[in-house]
Image: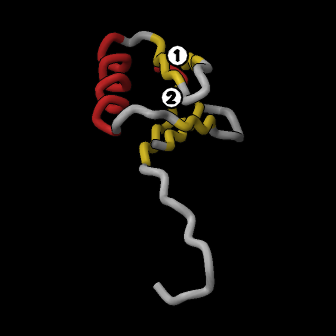
Amino acid sequence: MEIRIGILHAPREIVIESGETAEAVQATVEAAIAANATLRLQDEKGRLVLVPVANLGYIDIAAVESRRVGFGKA
């Protein structure tokens, strides 16, 4: 699962690869926003990302597509 987080007034976004489901990530984000707390997400390598919800611009949750190999038509 790929998660992209846009931060207000920051030119770059944060990209996280997570092993969680989209529903679990969405629930975590919604709980942090509802509590006006810090969003805490952990990536596949164990790194912890903390973002104050006041600074969130957007969050994009997308499944990672497997790359196709070869020259055949799809």
Residue 47 versus residue 58 in the image, above or below: above
- Residue, x 46% and y 38% (percent of image)? 59
- Residue, x 48% and y 58% (percent of image)? 65
Q: Nearer the viewer, residue 68 or 59?
A: 68
56 left or right of 35 in image: right
- What is the tally of numbered marks visible in this picture? 2
The crowd level at tag 2 (other Cα within 10 Å; few <14, some 14-19, many 20+) is some
Q: Secondary structure at mark 2?
A: strand
Q: Position of residue 10 (x, y in %)?
A: 68, 34
Q: Position of residue 62 (x, y in %)?
A: 43, 49
Q: Which residue is mark 1?
A: 52
For the N terminus, which image quadrant?
Answer: top left
Residue 69 versus residue 65 in the image, above or below: below
Q: Secondary structure at mark 1?
A: strand
Circles 2 and 1 in contact, beta carbons < 8 Å: yes
Q: Position of residue 33 (x, y in %)?
A: 36, 20
The crowd level at tag 1 (other Cα within 10 Å; few <14, some 14-19, many 20+) is some
Q: Quadrant of residue 71?
A: bottom right
- Residue, x 51% and y 60% (percent of image)? 66
Q: Which residue is mark 2?
A: 56
Q: Position of residue 63 (x, y in %)?
A: 42, 50
**What amino acid type is highlighted by mark number 2?**
Leu
Q: Residue furthest bottom?
A: 73
Q: How did the renderer colour the structure?
A: secondary structure
Residue 67 versus residue 14 in the image, above or below: below
**What amino acid type is highlighted by mark number 1?**
Pro
Q: Quadrant of residue 4?
A: top right
Q: CA distance from mark 2 to mark 1?
A: 7 Å
Q: Quadrant of residue 69?
A: bottom right
